[in-house]
Image: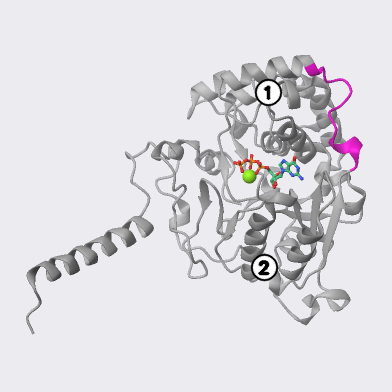
């Protein structure tokens, strides 16, 4: 039977539309002019076939069953600071992490909030995992603005930062959140006997099956900190963070590790303007919405002294110092850089950046795609400098 020409044309148009739709969805990242994205590596290492990391690995077994029978788990927790209103985003992130990893290991979840969690939040998050969930209120003295911060000066500074387009500068809770994540969370009494944590934010995505116990990996392979994404920061948010850091290390040269990552922290070749505006700091940092780390580092005397120095200087409020650059500078200076690990095998997204390895264990992200946002966002990738100065530990 002959098909009328308009119907054929419509059919063809529908096919073309579907092809275009799938192409848009799965197209490879837009190629950039050679050398623009990477100065030191020719191609994104995420394009190389990725397996599990080298070293000792522990796999799922009966000893990881939920509850007290789970004897293989170490002192570790999944950790989220979250608001009641972010329940849906939290459930989505939990769903991804439970599916790809935690249903095999059943590590507990610890949720933190500056106000009490609602019953709905508690019921729905507990229903999303077989593991134990803990709900913790942040003590007032950990969250409130410290007494030495002048409110008028904060408001004036926030207005100036806002003019410079520093995001969230006039939102006091954002400053409180950054300070808490920098120097308070690991002091919460509920974490007193916990050593390792994996930080999870609402709405993030995990794409790849991970079959080994990442906490045991950290412990057995002597790692302090694990990251996925490594970025440049907005220099306008941290103009005096590096000068304050320099003052601190002049007073405490003994805290600087001999195998530090100073060249990554101070590189001025790749983005000289950032280095200039941040007064000597490259602004490179580990993107701390994902962190797998050993809290012993934050609990060390070196970090405690450093945090107190910064806290007194006031930049968590008069500027918008983030926990990401604060954590990263401390790690880059006071820790042996071989103890910092790139979890290249953990597929991850927090809008607008990805870590997406080339592995049959990954679904839902495009290998090697760094961002699905505007092309200029590729310039925010600081991994090439990390690989250049430190390597791919
Ligand atoms: N309980 C509580 N959680 C907060 C507060 N502010 C931020 N958070 C949490 O802290 C984390 C970081 O906050 P975000 O607003 O996502 O900050 P961000 O990642 O820099 O910003 P986005 O790019 O917008 O995601 C998230 O897990 C939030 O849920 C707050 O005032 N109270
Ligand atoms: Mg976020």
What are the residue bounds of the magenta stretch? Answer: 139-151
Residue 44 spot, x, y in % from top left: 44, 50
Q: Quadrant of the N terminus?
A: bottom left
Task: Specify the color scheme.
Answer: one colour
Location of mark 1 (residue) = 242
Q: Residue furthest bottom?
A: 1
Ligand 1 in which quarter: top right
Residue at x 59%, y 26% (from the top left corner): 166
Residue at x 52%, y 70% (from the top left corner): 361
Q: How many marks?
A: 2
Give 30 or 332, whichever is nearer the viewer: 30
Is 222 on the left-hand or right-hand side of 4?
A: right
Residue 339 spot, x, y in % from top left: 70, 49
Which quadrant holds residue 318? top right
Q: Is residue 145 magenta?
A: yes
Residue at x 39%, y 40% (from the top left corner): 375
Disc marking residue 98: 2
| SS class, disc 1 | helix
Q: CA distance from mark 1 to mark 2?
A: 38 Å
| SS class, disc 2 | helix
Q: Is residue 329 magenta?
A: no
């Amino acid at each position: 039977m002959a098909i009328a020409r308009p119907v054929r044309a419509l059919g063809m148009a529908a096919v073309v539309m579907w092809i275009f739709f799938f192409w848009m969805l799965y197209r490879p990242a837009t190629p950039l002019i050679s050398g623009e994205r990477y100065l030191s590596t020719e191609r994104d290492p995420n394009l190389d076939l990725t397996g599990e990391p080298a070293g000792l690995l522990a796999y799922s077994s009966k000893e990881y069953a939920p509850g007290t029978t789970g004897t293989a788990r170490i002192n570790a927790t999944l950790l989220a600071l979250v608001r009641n209103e972010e329940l849906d985003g939290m459930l989505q992130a939990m769903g991804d992490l439970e599916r790809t990893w935690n249903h095999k290991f059943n590590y507990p979840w610890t949720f933190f909030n500056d106000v009490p969690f609602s019953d709905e939040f508690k019921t729905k998050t507990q229903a999303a995992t077989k593991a134990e969930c803990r709900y913790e209120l942040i003590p007032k003295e950990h969250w409130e603005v410290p007494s030495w911060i002048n409110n008028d000066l904060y408001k004036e500074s926030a207005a100036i930062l806002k003019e410079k387009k520093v995001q969230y500068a006039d939102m006091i809770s954002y400053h409180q959140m950054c300070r808490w994540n920098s120097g308070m969370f690991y002091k919460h009494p509920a974490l007193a006997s916990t050593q390792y944590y994996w930080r999870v934010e609402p709405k993030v995505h995990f794409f790849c099956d991970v079959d080994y116990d990442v906490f045991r990996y950290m412990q057995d392979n002597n790692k302090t900190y694990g990251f996925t994404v490594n970025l440049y920061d907005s220099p306008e948010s941290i103009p005096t963070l590096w000068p304050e850091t320099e003052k601190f290390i002049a007073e405490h040269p003994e805290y600087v590790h001999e195998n530090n990552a100073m060249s990554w922290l101070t590189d001025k070749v790749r983005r000289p303007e950032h280095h200039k505006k941040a007064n000597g700091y490259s602004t490179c940092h580990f993107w701390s919405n994902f962190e797998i780390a050993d809290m012993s580092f934050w609990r060390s005397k070196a970090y405690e002294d450093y945090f107190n120095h910064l806290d007194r200087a006031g930049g968590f409020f008069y500027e918008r110092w983030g926990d990401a650059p604060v954590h990263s500078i401390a790690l880059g200076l006071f820790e042996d850089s071989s103890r910092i690990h790139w979890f290249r095998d953990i597929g991850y997204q927090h809008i607008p950046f990805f870590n997406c390895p080339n592995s049959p264990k990954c679904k839902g992200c495009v290998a090697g795609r760094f961002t699905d946002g505007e092309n200029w966002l590729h310039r925010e990738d600081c991994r090439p400098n990390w690989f250049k100065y430190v390597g791919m530990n």
